[in-house]
Image (tube, rainbow, N blue to C red):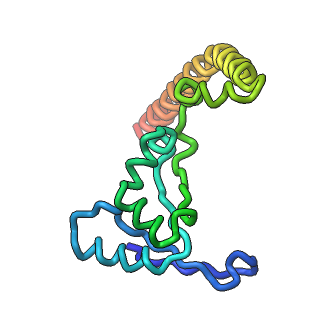
């Protein structure tokens, strides 16, 4: 278990070093963990809220991750602008879901929605074109497996015949 990571390097942003601390959420029921988190939060310069992209694309997630009490405390401590989100598992997102959920945002830029649909159609066409090749690949892999097994069996038969 890693409790704390210190970063140092030749980058101006890290000139004084950086410390990353994995804290429990702001609503932790364990009093000891909540106290440790509270101490760190009072003394930090930046707060990163880390969430899987599937949760982060939902408008309600930010509100959920930053409860009203937490937001109020940040405002009172002057740290509200020091919060940023880190989205993980970005390779596990469905473009069609994102388009469906954020069509209104995409349509605010002229031509963006149309371009997104064009790209989606292109991807769909490429997937349709690729599917027969993927099926053929599976069939060929099966044929190779069968041939390898037949080869092994033949070698075993040959060895048995030599031993007799």
How many marks can you see? 0
Query: Can I make out residue 162 in this image?
Result: no
Quadrant that contains the C terminus? top left
| 32 shown above or below 142 | below
Quadrant that contains the N terminus? bottom left
The residue shown at (56%, 66%) is 82
| 128 shown above or below 76 | above
Q: Where is residue 95 in the image (x, y as percent from the top left)?
A: 59, 29
The outermost residue toward the left is 30
The outermost residue toward the bottom is 16
The residue shown at (73%, 19%) is 114
Q: Position of residue 79 (x, y in %)?
A: 52, 69
Q: Using the image as rendered, state which of residue 100 and residue 45 is in the foreground.
A: 45
The outermost residue toward the front is 76
The outermost residue toward the right is 111
| 141 shown above or below 82 | above
The quarter holding residue 24 reads: bottom left
Q: Position of residue 50 (x, y in %)?
A: 48, 57
In the image: residue 17, left or right of residue 151: right
The residue shown at (27%, 63%) is 28
Query: Can I make out residue 8 in this image?
Result: yes
Q: Using the image as rendered, state which of residue 63 and residue 72 is in the foreground.
A: 72
The residue shown at (63%, 31%) is 105
The quarter holding residue 122 reads: top right
In the image: residue 75, left or right of residue 29: right
Q: Where is residue 136 in the image (x, y as percent from the top left)?
A: 61, 17
């Amino acid at each position: 278990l890693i409790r704390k990571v210190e970063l140092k390097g030749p980058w101006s942003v890290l000139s004084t070093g950086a410390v990353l601390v994995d804290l429990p959420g702001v609503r932790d029921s364990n009093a000891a963990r909540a106290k440790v988190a509270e101490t760190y939060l009072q003394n930090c310069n930046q707060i990163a809220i880390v969430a899987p992209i599937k949760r982060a694309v939902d408008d309600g997630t930010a509100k959920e991750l930053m409860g009203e009490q937490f937001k109020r405390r940040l405002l009172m401590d002057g740290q509200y602008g020091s919060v940023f989100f880190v989205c993980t598992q970005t390779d596990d997102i469905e473009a069609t879901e994102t388009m469906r959920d954020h069509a209104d945002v995409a349509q605010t830029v002229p031509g963006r929605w149309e371009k997104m649909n064009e790209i989606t159609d292109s991807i769909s066409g490429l997937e349709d074109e690729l599917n027969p090749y993927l099926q053929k690949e599976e069939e060929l892999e099966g044929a190779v497996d069968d041939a390898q097994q037949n080869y092994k069996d033949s070698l075993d038969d040959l060895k048995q015949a030599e031993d007799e």
